[in-house]
Amino acid sequence: MRQIFISIFLIFFLFNCKQSTESTATDSSKTEVVDEVSNSSKAEFAIIIHGGAGTILKKNMTPEREAAYKAKLEEAIRVGYEILKDGGSSLDAVQKTINIMEDSPLFNAGKGAVFTNAETNELDASIMDGNTLNAGASAGTTNVRNPINLARVIMEESPHVMMAGEGAETYAQEQGLQIVDPSYFSTDRRLESLKRVKDREAKKEKNIDTESAYLDFYDADIKNAKFGTVGCAALDKNGNLAAGTSTGGMTNKRYGRVGDAPLIGAGTYANNNSCAVSSTGWGEYFIRAMVAHDISALMQYKGLTLKEAAQEVIQTKVPELGGDGGIIAVDKDGNMVAEFNTAGMYRASMNDKGELEIGIYKD
Ligand code: ASP
């Protein structure tokens, strides 16, 4: 009886050992398969752009205007796409793509930038190399035609990351960048926007006493005083990520105000270990939420996917603080995301198969 019992026990024991070896083997082969799948689905290169986020509603858009935005987004992204397809760097793709949008009066960057309270145009830009974590940024320039070019020379030619105001302008001149008369940036459309915002502000000041300055800052109306910041994120064939952002900031901004766009970690971030991000939205909140770096950190340290990380920051963290806006981003495998909590965001993406997607509204 005792022998029978021991035999049954041994058979049971051996059977279990076999099962667990098999299941370990199955698990590890599963891991390999998953790795292979993700490797084989890794894109060779990818590019995504934005032209600003905000209350962009179809009912307020004419078909001509919509077509003009779409055409410019397509023109811009195709420039970067061709660079990447030919084996060029993500930094070149980002810079040249942004140049097209800076030169277009449709966007709040370069020509067509919004006006400050003093009726000037003060431009901010930044760029980051995900391979070296080198970065460059310029703030508050008034005569450098393409601020993203200045950000790039600051990154590559100077020992600094950020330069502002007159010093940045002098450096741009020294580096041979194109300098324009400040009136180059002016457009009637943006001047009209400034007048509207100032009118609203004057009306408010009549009704509201001591806290008017703060109320103006927190007023929902100013959410609409910023449209059309531009940005680009790209992955090149060498696996290098880059991101860049260029903007005129917010209509009616005062006294040397600098937004998130030129701040590395808020408006722009790129890291080959995670992703490349460019932000657009209410800069004060994007600075406090460290939007671009937060997305990268959630991926790198917490293992979130790009989509999960972007949702966490844009749909939860930023709105909880009271801000609005969006981001475009690409990860090291070429996955692309456009995430925003506003009614719309001008955006476009192209993958390594040449498939183009363009969007303006939420759906
Ligand atoms: N983020 C920009 C700023 O606050 C504005 C925008 O993206 O629309 O300067």
Image (spheres, rainbow, N blue to C red):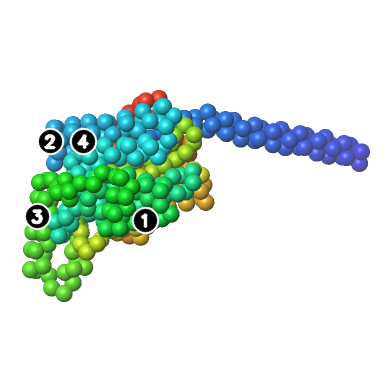
Tell me the tag on residue 195: 3
According to the picture, the residue beneath numbered tag 2 turns out to be 62
Q: CA distance from mark 2 to mark 4?
A: 11 Å
Q: CA distance from mark 1 to mark 4?
A: 31 Å
Q: Is residue 350 left or right of residue 141?
A: right
Q: Residue at x 18, y 41 (%)?
A: 105
Q: Report crowding for label 1: few under 14, some 14 to 19, many 20 or more residues within 10 A (C-alpha).
A: many
Under circle 4, the secondary element is: helix
Q: Is residue 269 left or right of residue 53?
A: right
Q: Residue at x 13, y 32 (%)?
A: 64
Q: Place residue 256 in its image quadrant.
A: bottom left
Q: CA distance from mark 3 to mark 1?
A: 31 Å
Q: Nearer the viewer, mark 3 or mark 1?
A: 1
Q: Report crowding for label 2: few under 14, some 14 to 19, many 20 or more residues within 10 A (C-alpha).
A: few
Locate residue 127, reporting x and y percent. Answer: 37, 47
Q: Report crowding for label 3: few under 14, some 14 to 19, many 20 or more residues within 10 A (C-alpha).
A: some
Under circle 1, the secondary element is: strand
Q: Residue at x 72, y 37 (%)?
A: 20
Q: Is residue 173 above or below residue 98?
A: below
